[in-house]
Image (spheres, rainbow, N blue to C red):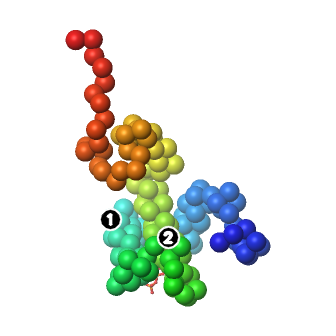
Amino acid sequence: MDSDSTPPCAPSWGEYSLQHVRESAEAFSAEREWEQFHTPRNLLLALVGEVGELAELFQWKGDAGCGPGLPGWSDAEREHLGEEMSDVLIYLIRLADRCGVSLAEAVRLKFEKNALKYPAEHARGSAAKYTQLAVSEPKTNS
Ligand SMILES: Nc1ccn([C@H]2C[C@H](O)[C@@H](COP(=O)(O)OP(=O)(O)OP(=O)(O)O)O2)c(=O)n1
């Protein structure tokens, strides 16, 4: 969606941070006294269930209906897709919170590790697993 067609009230990620999602999920749970249910195990199961609902939207579409931009998808399908993605994100962030994991720091470190495992000069244009990439061994003096 280009900027001209974005509704004026739609927040960008700059205005609606993952920290805001975290705090909203915490407040939503507290207001309903749902901390008792939001155990790591329950949240993981809820997350997996929502990933299943997300996958269901792509089920039986065929390759043609699942390319970038999702050609042929109706507005209702796109809205539903956003809802399921939101559920996945909300549960993942809530899970990290209830596990005591700093997801922001974990993601930052993960990108650093990914860059080491997949140097651009070796991984460019390849979907191979890092263990299959022809990364030369670091030179030693021996
Ligand atoms: N114990 C719960 C129940 C719900 N939610 C919040 C997080 C999700 O964003 C959303 C999930 O709600 P539903 O379980 O009703 O699932 P759906 O929204 O996917 O509804 P449906 O299963 O009808 O598609 O509500 C939550 O935090 N904790």
For mark 2, give the secondary structure. loop
Q: Amino acid at mark 2?
A: Pro
**x and y percent of residue 123 in the render?**
38, 44
Taking the image as shown, residue 92 lies to the left or right of residue 76, namely left
Figure quadrant of the C terminus:
top left
For mark 1, give the secondary structure. helix
Which residue is rendered at x = 38% and y = 83% of the image? 61
Q: Which residue is mark 1?
A: 41
* Residue 71 visible in the displayed image: yes
Q: Quadrant of residue 122?
A: top left
**x and y percent of residue 100 in the render?**
43, 51
Mark 1 touches mark 2? (CB < 8 Å): no
Q: Earlier in the sequence, mark 1 or mark 2?
A: 1
Residue 44 or 65: which is nearer the viewer?
A: 65
Task: Residue 88: give its label.
Answer: none
Q: Which residue is mark 2?
A: 68
Q: Amino acid at mark 1?
A: Arg
